[in-house]
Image (cartoon, rainbow, N blue to C red):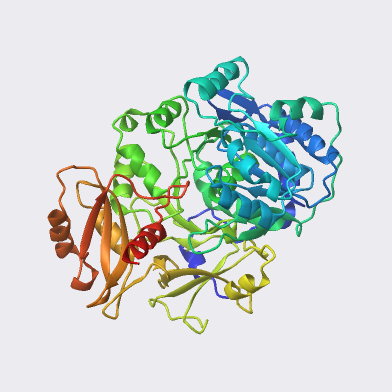
Amino acid sequence: MDKFWLGSYEKGVVPEIDPTQYRSLTHLLEEAFRKYADRKAYACMGKSITYAELDAMSQRVAAWLQNRGLKPGARVALMMPNILQYPVALAAVLRAGYVVVNVNPLYTPRELQHQLTDSGAEAIVVLENFAHTLEQVVGKTSVKHVVIASMGDMLGLKGLLVNLVVRKVKKMVPGYSVPGAVAFNRVLADGARLTMKPVTIGHDDIAFLQYTGGTTGVSKGAVLLHRNVIANVLQNEAWFAPTLARLKPGEQAQYACALPLYHIYALTVCALMGMRTGGMNLLIPNPRDIPGFIKELSRYRINVFPAVNTLYNGLLNNPEFAKLDHSGLMVCPGGGMAVQKPVADKWLKVTGAPIVEGYGLSETSPVVAANRCDITEFTGTIGLPLPSTELRILDEQDNEAPYGTAGEIAVRGPQVMAGYWQRDDETAKVMTADGFFKTGDVGIMEATGYTRIVDRKKDMILVSGFNVYPNEVEGVVAGLPGVLEVACVGVPDKHSGEAVKLYIVRKDPALSAEDVMSFCKEQLTGYKRPKFVEFRETLPKTNVGKILRRELRDEKATQAA
């Protein structure tokens, strides 16, 4: 395939990467532990751990897990927010020869049971705040070993106070009873008396079962092999290389890790790429606490700040954020959802660093494409395919569509998953005969190689035979002063089949539906204009901050029924 887009690459970005330089992710991690032993690897709530400490503690946890009799390839679930125990457990599971199953801590019992049962997880490390959820379903799963962490476990003496506040003052730990569960610190202590057994792990062994968010149906586990994730770590590193080269000799890159590590985006770009490059990750357990988040940011000179549009927007709408010293900020990768131009423009104005919008999926480890890191203005595209990545636009018959026409985005590259866990039928639906993964996203590729997302196939609204793409409408309405957040969905309409409805969270309480309609009349052609506007206090979101249009659509369907 002619990778004509390579001519649009930033100077210094290599066209291909070589994933074979590492035998496994374990090899990658252990190299980082040796190479950067004395450097800080992670910081959280005022406490930091070095690469050497991470090495030692993960060996202990790995030895403890192996001592439970788990066989190589066993699935181990991690159900924690961004706390220091997460990278320790992550490295431990991989080094012990097991498969990481990342679990959203805010899952309901039904969602948790599905994921544990579907993955066949035999062990789980869970923060005590969510142990009551596990209690309700653990007996219906294959889980035999439960490790329970507390917020203060790794915070030294301060941890005692943190646990007291979390449990007694803020009452954030509902009562639970999980017989046989072992405390995380007990695992560290017991593991110190054991020896981690070396395990032969190869490129084609499974590293992660990364469950898709379920926004398009039943949650499925994307099978990510060691080579898939190694590849994407190296692809991202290659993309950021010219930017990170601007660091002074010996200066350590500092990452703001506010997106949850159980999400593939933060896992690859923050945790794994951060460790591969010897960086330090500032872990933020609760990014929704914007004042607390800003206070943490004030203590560090952040260089890399991956986030989603809603998080960037939330920070910008707090006046304290603009007062921070942003001089260290070099690159802000935006993903997870479409970045809106008003947010990108304001972010650049406030911080001096552009939001570099990219695109990826759980099934692609996750990054597929990104804008150049040296952009100075918002492009409205997802950028160019990463090194060693091919991108195609397919028509309804899976033939390549001409440039400038809309079609389904398809991806081929070393970061593409092996398939869906135990779902060959679902895998067959998304893979072409020549190895392209069909993303379900509609896009248009320009002759330069830049691609613009038009929308998810399922989110498209059909108004009197005309296609309306919610991303476009939301992007326009987000530019209206007084709008904080907006979601656009299609609702049944007896005249046009479907009509456009907006759900808006106001920044200005005086904003009216008439103001919105009038603004849209100026900005959008007739069939794209909203017929209905509803104001809300909040919009439903995934834990990564992506607005769930599906929930709004389902809500309307239920009301109509």
Q: How many marks?
A: 0
Q: Nearer the viewer, residue 139 or 415?
A: 139
Q: Nearer the viewer, residue 185 or 440?
A: 185
Specify whether residue 234 is in view: no
* Residue at the extreme top: 157
Q: Nearer the viewer, residue 181 or 5?
A: 181
Q: Residue at x 29, y 41 (%)?
A: 349
Query: Residue 304, image x and y in percent?
Result: 48, 40
Q: In the shown orientation, is residue 190 left or right of residue 212?
A: right
Specify whether residue 534 is in view: yes
Q: In which quadrant of the rendered view does residue 212 lie?
A: bottom right
* Residue at the extreme front: 561
Q: Residue at x 72, y 48 (%)?
A: 25
Q: In which quadrant of the rendered view does residue 181 lie?
A: top right
Q: Residue at x 51, y 84 (%)?
A: 397
Query: Residue 353, image x and y in percent?
Result: 38, 42
Vertical side of 138 occupied by 500: above or below = below
